[in-house]
Amino acid sequence: GNAAAKDGKAKRPGDFMPWGDATTKLAGGKPAKAVGVMFSRARTDNWVFKDGKYPLQNNYMSKSGQFLADTVVVAQTKTTIAPYKDPGGAIVPVSHFTGRGKAWIMRAGQIVEATWVKKGEKGAVTFTDASGAAIEIPPGKVWLDLIPKGNGQVEPGGVIVK
């Protein structure tokens, strides 16, 4: 938890991501200036690398409220269906960010394919590249997209590099 330390100062929570430092670079990336992250037939996040950041092109945020990501992490997760429907009567998918799966990491106009591993809901996530080497996430603003692996009721999501 986030319990206060004995000196009365708040204790820093554990890292959720495997953070690198300012010199950390993603190795083995492929150019990716524009990337579509597909959640379903109805929703694809369109990320475009611009001025060193990844603004989400098709969002509902005001211009001043834009989240300018330095890094976008996409993890494909096991998906189940919630026991309730949304207000329109549609099924509600639930992402389970535990276990292991495919990942894509975008940074500095590059994309790297990876594998993520996360033990339990409260566990920290780790990433490895195709050779099994650990991947650290450079510091900065990170956006995390969880896309479905697919399960018969939900189609698998995907990543399209344009």
Image: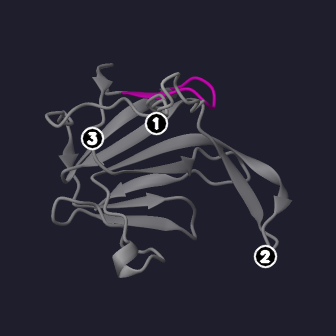
Q: What residue type is labelled 2?
A: Gly
Q: Which of marks 2 and 1 is nearer the N terminus?
A: 2
* Magenta span: 118-127
Q: Which of marks 3 and 1 is nearer the N terminus?
A: 1
Q: Classify residue 112 as left or right of residue 2.
A: left
Q: Which amino acid does label 3 sit on?
A: Pro
| Residue 119 within the segment the image draws in magenta | yes
Q: In this view, does 5 lie above or below 94?
A: above
Instruction: Compare residues 57 and 156 and report the one nearer the observer.
Output: 57
Spatial distance from mark 2 to mark 3, Cα to Cα? 39 Å
How many numbered marks have been drawn onto this rendered protein structure?
Answer: 3
Instruction: Compare residues 16 and 76 and report the one nearer the observer.
Output: 16
Instruction: Compare residues 64 and 98 and report the one nearer the observer.
Output: 64
Q: In which quarter of the image is the C terminus?
A: bottom left
User: Residue furthest toward the right?
Assistant: 83
Check the image and tell me how it is coloured.
Answer: one colour
Q: Classify residue 81 as left or right of residue 67.
A: right
According to the image, label 1 marks what residue?
102
What is the quadrant of residue 54 in the picture? bottom left
The x, y position of residue 14, in whole percent, is 47, 28
Between disc 3 and disc 1, the foreground one is 3
